[in-house]
Amino acid sequence: NKKGGGIFVERCTTLIVNSRISENTAMTGGGISQMYVWNTLTISNCTIDGNLATFSSGGVAVSQPDSIVVNCVISNNAATGVAMWTGWGGGVDIAAGAKLINSIIIGNRAKYGGGVMLNGNVYSGAAGSVISNCQVIANTVSSFGVGGGLYIDPLYTISAGTPMMVVDSVIAYNVADGSGAGIREQQTGVDYA
């Protein structure tokens, strides 16, 4: 399966509630993958664990600015791509404008953004992303990888035009062999509160 080993969302409004998405494999979005156009995704009160992406987005690929992940545990997922600009977003890969709220992202691994990857793929006019009341803990990036907890794509500011916010969150005990064990931010606008 190329996208969405567990669930693939395309051209619809989707609500995934009180579910477990576990032990799935795909190229992109080992657990869940959202297509880039014409849809909104809400993931609420879910456990997303043990999924594998051979290219990117081990647990969840959230590609639309109005989408939200809330009250979820995202754990022990991996994005294992080794070629240049693959292997990002071990736990969750979110586009600018999406929201990650009151969730635990723990024990995931990738090359870029072991826990969370904020990427620059977004349509114009999106507001900044929000990570609020989350715990991003004990995630890792592989050899020479960056952003053990959170990696912010340098294209983010160019794409979104508004800063992202990290609010009331814990980013701790993450590991990076390269740089930014907690957060790796480059040429972007981020407000921390």
Image (spheres, rainbow, N blue to C red):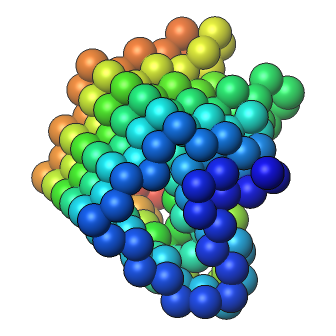
Measuring 40% from the left and 72% from the top, which residue is drawn there?
A: 16
- From the viewer's perspective, is residue 35 above or below residue 169? below
Name the residue located 69 percent from the left edge and 33 percent from the top edge: 87
Which part of the image, by quadrant, shows the C terminus? bottom left
Relative image position of residue 165 (x, y in whole percent): 32, 61
Task: Tell me, yes or no, if residue 190 can be seen here.
Answer: yes
94 and 153: which one is in front?
94
Asked if 178 appears above or below 110 in the picture, the reply is above
Residue sitting at x 45%, y 51%: 21
Residue at x-position 37% and y-position 36%: 75
Q: How many marks?
A: 0
Q: Is residue 120 above or below residue 148?
A: below
Q: Is 30 positioned to the left or the right of 141 in the image? A: right
Q: Nearer the viewer, residue 138 or 96?
A: 138
Q: Is residue 100 left or right of residue 170?
A: right
- Is residue 166 visible in the rendered image? The answer is no
Drawn side of residue 18 relative to residue 59, left or right: left
Q: Quadrant of residue 78?
A: top right
Q: Quadrant of residue 131?
A: bottom left
Q: Position of residue 24 (x, y in %)?
A: 59, 43
- Locate residue 46, reporting x and y percent: 31, 58
Q: Nearer the viewer, residue 157 or 5?
A: 5
Q: Measured from the top left, where is residue 178 in percent x and y?
A: 57, 14
Q: Residue furthest right?
A: 83
Pick the front one: 33 or 120: 33
Query: Where on the picture, by quarter, is residue 104?
Result: top left
